[in-house]
Image (cartoon, rainbow, N blue to C red):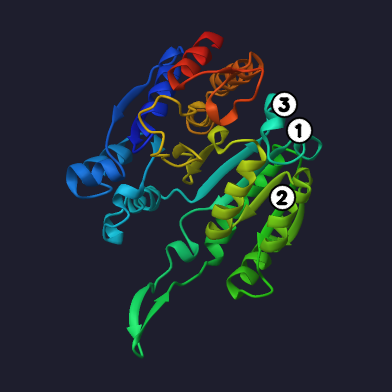
């Protein structure tokens, strides 16, 4: 089982170190090799996604990523910014399906910004299309027209792209509570009218799954009004980017949320949902649990090691039940620990 390890920028190397320790503690044979992606790659090679990284990622069975980016590189030309490396690897590997679970652990109910009775028992899966939409559409750019600057981007989806991500979402719903909410903006955008049409057509193939539709502005409101009404949500790239981050804060901290980005054969890139947090990089205080849980998703989806995935997830639950907390989820009466100590606790629980 070959894993391409990309620690990335900011807190990436710190949280990645703990995830790697957890993987090595399992009774499984992994080949893990590190490479550069993001700002660290720009510093070393001038390219956020160097050819050597591309070669390693293509040869691996899965990619485990820390985080990329930071204000240090914001002034660079757009094609050299760290985020272009992330978009590049997603596109090259054909990682079209992004799965982001938003689960509220009982011990963290008070850490949520919403009342405990609103979020207690929350368990949502957001399925986001990842390689299309306005993020990749052409033409795009900034030009001077009629004496002033003019910025433009293009939103588009093909029927086959929508059908492909729709199947992922319907199949995921089948394994859960058999409810799927498709999010669009069909009252304004023709692109998402097509999205709704295709999702409705797909529903006929999944009579055991209840399909509903919701406009994105209403979905954003409902996530903070009554989030437990949702089981699986599916939406396009831009809407999914925003809604999944909103959902993450329902759980108390984005530092708790893993994600998986999969191709058609379940080869995947696994990463925490949070960013590189350069303000706390190197201080040993970052929360590694989202990265450790991302490794658990890798075990489940790419390597079909369900028992090992459940062991890792069970260890995280045990650590939270024991009262260990990094700063982002700390509350009075719990034990504040650093990145390495949290990793130690997970290893002990394993």
Mark 2 or mark 3: name the one nearer the start of the chain.
3
In which quadrant is the C terminus drawn?
top right
Q: Mark 3 points at which residue?
A: 106
Instruction: Tell which of 73 and 283 is nearer to you.
Output: 283
- Residue 343 located left or right of residue 50: right
Secondary structure at badge 2 equals: helix
Residue 220 drawn at (x, y percent): 68, 56
Q: Which mark identifies residue 14?
A: none
Given the current orientation, which residue lies at the most extreme right position?
117
* Residue contact between numbered discs 2 and 3, judged by CB atoms under 8 Å: no
Mark 3 or mark 1: name the one nearer the start of the chain.
3
Residue 278 drawn at (x, y percent): 38, 39
- Residue 318 located left or right of residue 68: right
Q: Which residue is drawn at 69% across and 74% down?
A: 187
Q: Name the residue under label 1.
A: 121
Tell me, yes or no, if residue 61 can be seen here: no
Secondary structure at badge 1 equals: loop
Q: Is 178 above or below relative to 1?
A: below
Secondary structure at badge 3 equals: helix
**How many angstroms separate mark 2 from mark 3 (CA)?**
19 Å
- Residue 180 located left or right of residue 19: right
Q: Is 70 above or below relative to 196?
A: above
Given the current orientation, which residue lies at the most extreme front position?
332
**How many angstroms separate mark 3 from mark 1 (CA)?**
7 Å
Mark 1 or mark 2: name the one nearer the start of the chain.
1
Tell me, yes or no, if residue 135 can be seen here: yes
Q: Is 206 above or below relative to 254?
A: below
Q: Which mark identifies residue 223?
A: 2
Q: Residue at x 45, y 48 (%)?
A: 95
**How many angstroms separate mark 1 from mark 2 (CA)?**
14 Å
Residue 261 drawn at (x, y percent): 48, 43
**Tally of marks:** 3
């Amino acid at each position: 089982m070959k894993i391409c390890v990309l620690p990335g920028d900011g807190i990436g190397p710190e949280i990645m170190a703990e995830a790697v320790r957890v993987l090595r503690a399992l009774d499984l044979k992994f080949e893990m090799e590190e490479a550069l992606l993001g700002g660290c790659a720009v510093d070393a090679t001038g390219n956020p996604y160097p050819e050597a990284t591309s070669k390693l990622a293509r040869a691996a069975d899965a990619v485990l990523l820390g985080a990329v980016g930071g204000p240090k590189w914001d002034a660079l030309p757009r094609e050299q910014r760290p985020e272009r490396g992330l978009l590049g690897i997603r596109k090259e590997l054909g990682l079209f399906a992004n799965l982001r679970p938003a689960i509220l652990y009982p011990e963290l109910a008070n850490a949520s910004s919403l009342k405990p009775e609103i979020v207690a028992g929350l368990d949502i899966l957001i399925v986001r299309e990842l390689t299309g939409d306005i993020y990749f559409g052409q033409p795009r750019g900034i030009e001077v027209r009629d004496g002033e600057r003019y910025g433009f981007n293009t939103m588009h989806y093909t029927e086959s792209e929508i059908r492909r991500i729709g199947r992922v979402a319907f199949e995921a719903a089948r394994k859960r509570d058999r409810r799927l909410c498709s999010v669009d903006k069909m009252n304004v955008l023709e692109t998402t009218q097509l999205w709704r049409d295709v999702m409705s057509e797909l529903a006929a193939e999944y009579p055991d799954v209840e399909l509903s539709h919701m406009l994105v502005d209403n979905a954003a409101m409902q996530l903070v009004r009554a989030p437990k009404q949702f089981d699986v949500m599916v939406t396009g790239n831009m809407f999914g980017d925003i809604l999944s981050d909103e959902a993450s804060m329902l759980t108390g901290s984005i530092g708790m949320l893993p994600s998986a980005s999969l191709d058609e054969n379940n080869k995947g890139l696994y990463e925490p949902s949070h960013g590189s947090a350069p303000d706390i990089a190197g201080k040993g205080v970052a929360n590694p649990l989202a990265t450790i849980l991302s490794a658990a998703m890798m075990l489940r989806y790419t390597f079909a090691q369900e028992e090992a995935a459940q062991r890792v997830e069970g260890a995280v639950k045990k650590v939270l039940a024991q009262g260990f907390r990094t700063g982002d989820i700390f509350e009075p009466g719990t034990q504040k620990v650093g990145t390495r100590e949290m990793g130690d606790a997970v290893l002990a629980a394993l």
